[in-house]
Image: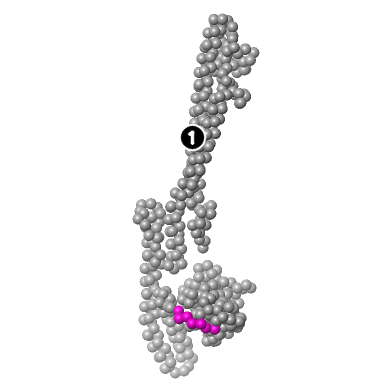
Amino acid sequence: MSRLTPARHLLNWRSLHWKIAALTAAAACAVTAVVGVLVHRATYDWSLTIGQQKAYRALEDATVAYARTGRRGEALADPDELPAPILGSLRRGVALTWYDDRKPDQPWMWAARVVDGEPLAVRMEMGPERRSLQALDRHIVMAALAALAVVVPLAALAASLPTRRLRRVAQTARRISEGELDARIGMDGRRGDEIAEISAAVDSMAGSLQRWLLNEQRFTADVAHELRTPVMGLMTSAELLPDGEVTDLVRDRVRVLRTLVECLLEISRLDAGAERADRVPVPLGEVVEESVRRTGLQAAVTVTGAPVVETDPRRLDRIIANLVINAHRHGRSPVEVAVDGTTVVVRDHGPGFPDELLAHGPQRFRTGAAERGRGYGLGLAIALGQAGVIGADLTLATAPGGGAAAVVCLPERVQRG
């Protein structure tokens, strides 16, 4: 499962933190662009209106002077210089103004009319207005960039507040999934928003799950404890039966029942956290060899060096015995046990662990046998629980070349060889 620390979270561009910041930046850019276009357009229209007014006044003054003196003067343009759009309109007797931007660096505003059959026109330079508009556009862009430089960090900072709370929810959910059932998010006085509702729902779910599991553990322990006395009575009674084939079958089934009850009691103690390791320095190779020998099953044991570890030999014996029995029950011979340093590997040459077991771990009361469904029952569950008590890591994997491999890594507290 992937976990992101706060520092790595900031480097993850897919995180909600940066998506909120990017959305804020995009919204700010969109608003700035709309405002910039509106301001540009309004300023442009205003400059055209001012230019038209100036051109009309200049045309009025030039027309009065032309009517009084009969001469065009410097204000009126030569008819031969008039652009085609103006000449076409004047021929129809229409007075007009026309913005001439054929030369973007030197725009003009024309005003023209017909007086006594003569076309009269003046033009006003619009270069200053064009340069003012360009300067305004530059200032808008610079102001937008400055605003983004302030808005984006503030948006990222503001986004970190809800995303920090969401990360806390995710971290608590992971702790619960890993078995820490008393983990809670807590409201921190915040109520009413969606994250607070999620936090309350997760806390409520964790509380219900914890109560359900505790009730299940108590029920399992009570059932196993109540069964222990009658099972012991059955064992005693079976030993008093006369020898025979039926008696051997009864004794075998009673032993199986007794083993199941003992396993249930052991699992209930492991679930309740009542087990404590009694660690002492032990020769790892000798302990493993003795454990394999007591199972009465064939397994090749190889020991590299003479490793010594500090652990609980009784619990280690329980782990190794369960793994060897499980390898014979659900795998195929040969079963090999290798001790190298503080690592013990139990391998068989069967079909290997099911994918479901590798993904989710051992499932109680589910075995790899076809008639009992998939999974690996109580043996692996007990081995995993005892490994946790002594601080060892138990990893289940598929061995190179096929077969199931269970790897026990003991803590390196005392290591001599």
Amino acid type for the residue under numbered disc 1: Val
Q: Is residue 337 visible?
A: no
Q: Is residue 98 above or below residue 371?
A: above
Q: Is residue 296 above or below residue 60?
A: below
**Residue tagged 1:** 35
Percent x, y for residue 180? 43, 67
Circle 1 — which element?
helix
Q: Residues within 10 Å of mark 1 (few under 14, many from 20)?
A: some
Left/right placement of residue 398 relative to residue 18 reads: right
Name the residue located 47 percent from the left edge and 80 percent from the top edge: 279
Left/right placement of residue 133 relative to residue 219 reads: right
The colour scheme used here is one colour
Q: Is residue 59 magenta?
A: no
Q: Is residue 27 above or below residue 198?
A: above
Residue that extends furthest to the top in the rendered view of this protein: 69
Percent x, y for residue 398? 58, 72
The magenta-colored residue range is 277-283
Percent x, y for residue 149? 50, 43
Percent x, y for residue 57? 51, 14
Name the residue located 42 percent from the left edge and 93 percent from the top edge: 240
Name the residue located 48 percent from the left edge and 49 percent from the top edge: 156
Name the residue located 38 percent from the left edge and 55 percent from the top edge: 196
User: In the figure, residue 113 lies in which quadrant?
Assistant: top right
Q: Is residue 280 magenta?
A: yes
Q: Is residue 174 visible?
A: yes
Number of disc labels: 1
- Quadrant for the C terminus in the image: bottom right
Please tell me which residue lies in front, 384 or 363: 384
User: In the figure, residue 299 lies in which quadrant?
Assistant: bottom right
